[in-house]
Amino acid sequence: MSVWAIGDLQGCYDATQRLLDKIRFDPVRDRLWFCGDLVNRGGQSLETLRLIHSLREYSTVVLGNHDLSLLAVAERTVEERRKVNPDLQRVVFADDCAELVGWLRGCGLLHIDHSLGWVMIHAGLVPQWTIPQAVRYAAEVEQQLRGKSYRKLLRNMYGDRPVWSPGLRGYDRFRAIINIFTRMRYCTPRGRISIDEKGAPGTQPAGLYPWYEVPGHAKRDLKIVCGHWSTLNLMIGHGVYAIDTGAVWGGKLTALQLDHEELHLVQVPGLDLGA
């Protein structure tokens, strides 16, 4: 059996199929971990979502910011849904939209496998968070998403504030947790996120660090695989394996084998921007 983590798909169905072929994925023996952002921008979000949904018995998905946005859009009026880009419109007006988004809403913000020694998230963690704390905070939002009040959460999750604090309550708390798990790249030593900074390390203002490089961050005894940060490209260091290699921007789609003793990466070309 092989366990593969795969970076942000973002609606790149053709690239996803190429990657599954290249790793010789066999559902009888293999398992897949998807680092979030299954949809948006690639032009084939519906096909991609249907594919991963069809593989749901053999896969684990964590939610990215684009996935959460899709969940929110799917709950809007018909007129509001018509205002989103054509790629997402194909999803929210599909006959099987309710089934697809219902399944997606059941996915988590974090996945952990102690036997493998890995944690999967989409974006980042507050420097002070231990893995057990991250698991607890993710569960708070997951419970809301899977509960009867999920529509209210989806309406209230947007916004760059407040800054995370353990004392936050209600939707301020949920919004802060969501921003950390799905939008974080840079932050201050105290964990204040800089949402607007999206460039590669070295381009950020003084006082900001990549979330995994903050001095004195909490000790974590599990390796972390994540996506979200395409300008970071492939980054391996500090116990973090960042594998969003910009498939939707003409880069590559990356798979990382998690149950291999040595580093084993497989990549295929992403979206052909000249097509």
Image (tube, helix red, strand yellow):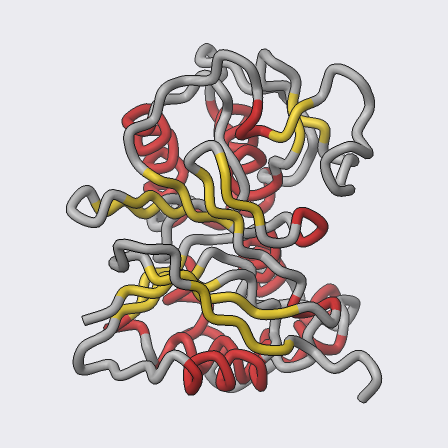
Specify the quadrant that holds the N terminus: bottom left
In which image quadrant can residue 15 be found?
bottom right
Taking the spot 32% from the left edge, 47% from the top edge, the residue there is 111
Image position, residue 126 (x, y; %): 50, 24
The total of numbered circles placed on residues is 0
Find residue 167 and report its horizontal and vertical position in percent. Answer: 46, 10
On the image, which quarter does residue 114 sit in? top left
Q: Is residue 193 left or right of residue 274?
A: left
Viewed as shown, does residue 273 lie left or right of 76? right
Q: Does residue 181 sit above or below 225 in this rendering?
A: above
Q: Nearer the viewer, residue 108 or 275?
A: 275
Q: Which quadrant is home to the C terminus? A: bottom right
Q: In this image, 142 relative to 246: left or right?
A: left
Above/below status of 166 relative to 123: above
From the top left corner, tell me how far across and down residue 270 is, in percent: 65, 75
The residue under the point 54% across, 84% down is: 47
Residue drawn at x 67%, y 47% is 232
| Residue drawn where x is 67% and y is 54% of the image | 230
Measured as percent of width and height from the top left, residue 34 is found at: 42, 62
Query: Vertical placement of 181 versus 209: above or below?
Result: below
Q: Which is more toward the observer, 10 or 272?
A: 272
